[in-house]
Every structure is written in structure tokens, then in C-alpha cells.
Image (spheres, rainbow, N blue to C red):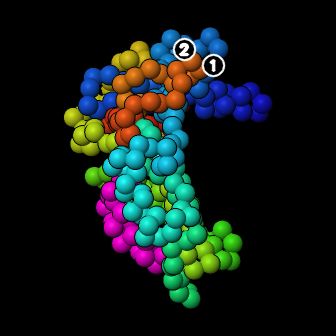
Amino acid sequence: MKRSVHRRRTASAGFLALLLLSTSAVIALQVPVQGGRFDRLVIEDAESSLDVATTAVASLPANDHARAGWEQFRAAHGKEWRVHLDRRSGAPLLAEGRGIPWVVPEGANVDTIASSLRPFIAGHRALLLANDAELVLDRDASGLLNPEVWQVVFKRVVAGVPVAGERYLFTIGHGSLMSFGTPRWSRIDANPSPDIDAAAAVERLSSYMGLTPADAVEVVLQPTLELIPLRAAGPPAGAGHGPFAGSLGSGYASLLTTSSRAAHVQ
């Protein structure tokens, strides 16, 4: 029995494959196993090198377009609002203040509150950089934080393709919209329509990994399309490179992939 469990764990330490659909390249991500057959093929997960660059709106030049927009927001909703942007995207990491009056009727739920937020999002698209049509309510992440405070989370989906790790969060409580922001909001410049299908992508991955009919591969998660954010041209993340200093909103690119999970049984 112990040998059987060990064998299963070995199989589970398989690979997460991101198959590029717009080029002939293939990225294979594998759980590190010392001396493994696929060690030399491992390519770093593109998302692992992403970093945000926090920028206070007040630190932007007085004539900056984004600063002017947020100053208008503060003039309309209260000078107490504090806004910090991700310099890479230009989107707000966190905007919080005294609150914007927000009626939450008795019997409200995440669906009704999300619906009430959509006009606000559409009306402030130039500041949030979020297209309401790309926002899909994440019911699992939304709900009551306490009896008086709601959290509403939207995932990002572009042309039917989810964007890995991107979401907008709104906090409503005590009759007010208290805060909102996004941990990352990349520029989507990749075509969301694949050049090849999932079967062809899997074929390319198998070729890259040198798999043969003798290799036993168990598919754990079927291939699905996904957009992943990338760092725009510039030095990689890490010590010595310093924070992103490019122009506001120019720090991200994107890539269309197919994500799949499989286990290679030794």
C-alpha cells in the first residue's frame, strides 16, 4: 500500500503545460524534481516575474491626464479619497475614501449589488480601465465580510477567454462604496482567437518534451484557453533592476495560451 501511494504522488508531480496558440513555441511548467527527465525543458512561468509598481496619484505630474481624471473624481466624491495606481497598467491598485453613498436594499445579494456597480464602472471606465463587458461576477469570492460590509469581485474575461489572475474588487458597507481596486490589470494586445486547436497544441507540447507512445500520460485537466499577462519589453524582475519606471500604462503585454494539467507516470 505504501508503494502504491508513493507511485501516485510521483505521478502527481507532473507538469502544467501552457501551449502557445499564436506561435510555434510551447511553454512547459513542471514541479521541480531533482534529476528528472524533463529538468532541462522547464521554462519559468511568465506570471512569476510580474510585479506592480505602486504610484500615488499625487506623485504624478500636475498636467498628467490620469492625475487630472482622478482629481475630478476626488472633487466629485470627496478630497479624502486616496488613490494608488499600478504604474505598469495605470489602473488603481486601491482607491479608498470617506465613501460614496450606496443604497443596499434589504434582501440584497451579490447579484443585485454587482448589478448596481456596473453603471459606476461604465461611467468611470477611463479611470478604472475596465470594460464592463469583460467583468464576470465571481460569486465564490463575493459575499458578506461582516453583517454590514459586502465584498464584490469580478473576474476578467476577454472575448470569452479568462485572463489569468485578474480581478476587480469593490467593498460596500455602512451605506457607502468604501473602496475598489485591482491587484493587476494588464493591457490585452494578444488576439483571443487561436491559430491552432487544443489537439495541435498538445501535439506540439508532446514533441517538445520528447514523449513517445511508451510514455504513460494521464490528463488531469483538459486544455482550456487562457490569456496570461507578460512584462512589456524591459529588464526582468528581480534584485538590481529597481521599480518599473516606464510611462504610465506601458508595462504589460499579453499572450494567448492553452492551459492543461497532466501527470507523467514513471
The amino acid at mark 1 is Val
Farthest front residue in view: 62
Residue at which label 2 appears? 39
User: Residue drawn at (36%, 18%), measured in percent from left and top?
Assistant: 207
**Residue 64 colored in magenta in the image:** no
Examine the residues drawn in magenta and state their main secondary structure. Answer: helix
**Residue 127 colored in magenta in the image:** yes
Q: Is 136 drawn above or below residue 177 in the view shown? A: above
Which of the two residues, 229 or 95, is positioned nearer the viewer here? Answer: 95
Q: Which mark is residue 212?
A: none
Where residue 145 sits, quadrant-wise, is: bottom right
Residue 137 drawn at (x, y percent) = 45, 64
Which of the two residues, 199 or 28, is positioned nearer the viewer here? Answer: 28
Sort mark 2 into few (<14), some (14-19) or many (20+) by Cα contacts within 10 Å: some
User: Residue drawn at (40%, 31%), measured in percent from left and top?
Assistant: 246
The amino acid at mark 2 is Asp
Residue at which label 1 appears? 33
Position of 11 with respect to 218 (left or right) is: right
Residue 164 drawn at (x, y percent) = 44, 44
The span picked out in magenta is 111-134
Where residue 131 sits, quadrant-wise, is: bottom left
Q: Quadrant of the C terminus?
A: top right
How far, Cα to Cα, is label 2 from label 1?
7 Å
Q: Quadrant of the N terminus?
A: top right
Q: Earlier in the sequence, mark 2 or mark 1?
A: 1
Residue 8 drawn at (x, y percent) = 65, 32
Q: Is 85 drawn above or below residue 206 in the view shown? A: below
Which of the two residues, 53 or 79, is positioned nearer the viewer here? Answer: 79
User: Residue drawn at (49%, 49%), measured in percent from left and top?
Assistant: 58
User: Residue drawn at (51%, 69%), measured in percent from left and top?
Assistant: 78
Q: Is 248 drawn above or below residue 2 in the view shown? A: below
Tag 1 secondary structure = loop
